Amino acid sequence: QQQVKQSPQSLIVQKGGISIINCAYENTAFDYFPWYQQFPGKGPALLIAIRPDVSEKKEGRFTISFNKSAKQFSLHIMDSQPGDSATYFCAASEIGTGFQKLVFGTGTRLLVSP
Amino acid sequence: DGGITQSPKYLFRKEGQNVTLSCEQNLNHDAMYWYRQDPGQGLRLIYYSQIVNDFQKGDIAEGYSVSREKKESFPLTVTSAQKNPTAFYLCASSPPMGRATYEQYFGPGTRLTVT
């Protein structure tokens, strides 16, 4: 019930291409879905997040697509750049509990080749 | 600069020794968290604290202990009872619920190696 499944485990994309990372969740009570970006040896940083009242959110080259009925959400990175090479984690939590306990996916290591 | 500091960045210990990892934040956040990160796995919650002098076990609390005597500080002790302590440890904090952002802010992490 608490799992968030993330795929693929690793991804290689050419510069300028589209990177797509998928996540699926089981707990229908989840109502906050962030994506975190982590560079080697650093802590993760929030990239973009979505609430279930919208099906898509875009910030620059980064877009979250959300499918509530399928319990899936994905991150799309348009015009991928070598600087985007990092590990990406999806996560989910219940805002309504009054405390943010994030459940993380297992991560996707993205490599953007020049 | 506001943020979260973790020290040290690298820590080496012999098996059987307890070790304490430091986490300090000057963001005036009430909630603080400790996560463990292993290769190929996501972040797993060890302990969290919503307020000073109160903390709760996360999903993998066995072999760990914490204290929260000050709002700014949330140290984690890895005890000798933790079977596989070698990992990357991340501290995070978050602003009070009800604000527009639900972001968790992470520190730079401490890589602990136990031999």
Image (cartoon, helix red, strand yellow):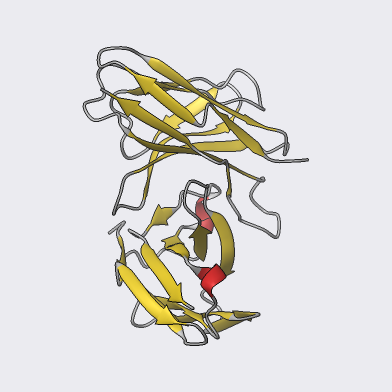
Q: Is residue B26 above or below residue A91?
A: above
Q: Is residue B64 visible?
A: yes
What is the quadrant of the C terminus of chain B in the image? top left
| Residue drawn at x 65%, y 80% as measured from the top left | A60
Q: x%, y% of residue B17?
A: 31, 12
Q: x%, y% of residue B11?
A: 43, 25
| Residue drawn at x 47%, y 63% as measured from the top left | A86
- B113 left or right, relative to A15: left
Q: In terms of image quadrants, where is residue A104?
A: bottom left
Q: Is residue A72 visible?
A: no
Q: Is residue A101 above or below residue B88?
A: below
Task: Give the camera-side residue of A106 and B10.
Answer: B10
- B107 left or right, relative to B89: right
Q: Is residue A52 above or below residue B75?
A: below
Residue projecting furthest to the left: B83
Q: x%, y% of residue A75?
A: 47, 76
- A87 left or right, relative to A4: right
Q: In terms of image quadrants, where is residue B46?
A: top left
Task: Give the camera-side residue of B108 and B33.
Answer: B108
Q: In terms of image quadrants, where is residue B93?
A: top right
| Residue drawn at x 33%, y 31% as measured from the top left | B61
